[in-house]
Amino acid sequence: MLQNVALLRPFLAVAKGGSISAGAQEMSISQPAVSKAIHRLERELGVALFERRARGVVLTRFGVALLRHAKQIETEWNFAQSELGAFKAGRTGHLRVGAGLYFAAALLPAAISELQARFPRLRIDLSVGANPRTLPALFGGDLDIVVGRLPTAGIPDYIETRHIVNVRLCIIASKTHPLAAKRRITAADLAAYPWVVYQDDDETVASRESIFRRMGAEPPRIAVESTSVMAIFQLLRSGPYLGCVASGLLVSAVGQGLVELPLPIEGTRFKGGAMFARTLANVAPINALIELLRRSAASP
């Protein structure tokens, strides 16, 4: 059993730097002091955390398992310091947020603005990406919270989920697109134009393919794949492209100049929400962000 949580700091420093010397430099202490702390931590846990090699160290399977928990403990401790310091000078907090396209473009801007009004010294790092990109970072402790599509399976026991909004996917195009004037769209109509998609958003691509299959046709080719939210919507506004996105994006700033195309079937629906480590369930900025996102989603 771990008796001294402070031993996690040198462990994290060495894991990050890849060597005892890098860990010592990170902590501004001597290499023997770092080595002693690592040996003590290994004795307390009863396992080897690092494998020593000629050019440094690598994590053992036990070290990899500990790393995720150690990152979460460090995050929770930093938040505790921030909240306690608020009674004095208000120490700086740090919230690492991962967000899917819909949340990042439609809900988060207003929510983050109000969150920082409540916590003026709170720093927020925002990473925008689909679940295949953000969830591994969350599970590994490199993100504190992810807001996006709630998976129906594959969530570890140590991750808590909270529902925020129900999302409907739709097919969109520019207001000047030839299909925008049609009253009823067929699969052949949709297949005649190039498509633009958000990179790594396999779930939305699968939903788009489901729409085509239900319309009795094969999915069309993807012409452009991009990691830039702004580039995707600018392409949709300025060219003959089609896209599959959350309908709520059309009432946001990025949706200006775009319209939903009328389909003979309804688009796929899914639950959107927040995912974070259970150890952070009582952290004030996380709970406040979820509350603000729910309010933003409920606004017309």
Image (cartoon, rainbow, N blue to C red):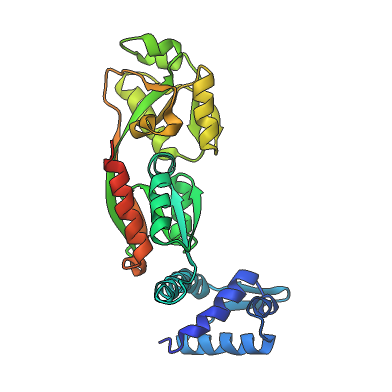
Q: Name the residue at 55% across, 35% down.
A: 226
Rendering coords of residue 135 (x, y %):
43, 53
Q: Name the residue at 30% across, 28% down.
A: 267
Q: Is residue 65 above or below residue 216?
A: below
**Quadrant housing the C terminus:** top left
248 relative position to 49: left or right: left
Q: Is residue 11 visible?
A: yes
Q: Find residue 69 and report its image quarter.
A: bottom left
265 relative position to 259: left or right: left
Rendering coords of residue 166 (x, y %):
27, 40
117 relative position to 127: left or right: left
Q: Find residue 287 and report its image quarter.
A: bottom left
Rendering coords of residue 170 (x, y %):
34, 27
Q: Find residue 82 and report its image quarter.
A: bottom left
Q: State the residue in front, 172 or 48.
A: 172
**Quadrant housing the N terminus:** bottom left
Name, please, the residue furthest toward the right.
54
Q: Is residue 155 visible?
A: no
Rendering coords of residue 108 (x, y %):
41, 46
Q: Is residue 68 above or below residue 36?
A: above
Q: Name the residue at 36% across, 60% down.
A: 286
Q: State the residue in front, 111 or 86.
A: 86
Q: Is residue 129 above or below residue 48?
A: above
Q: Is residue 160 above or below residue 175?
A: below
The number of discs equals: 0
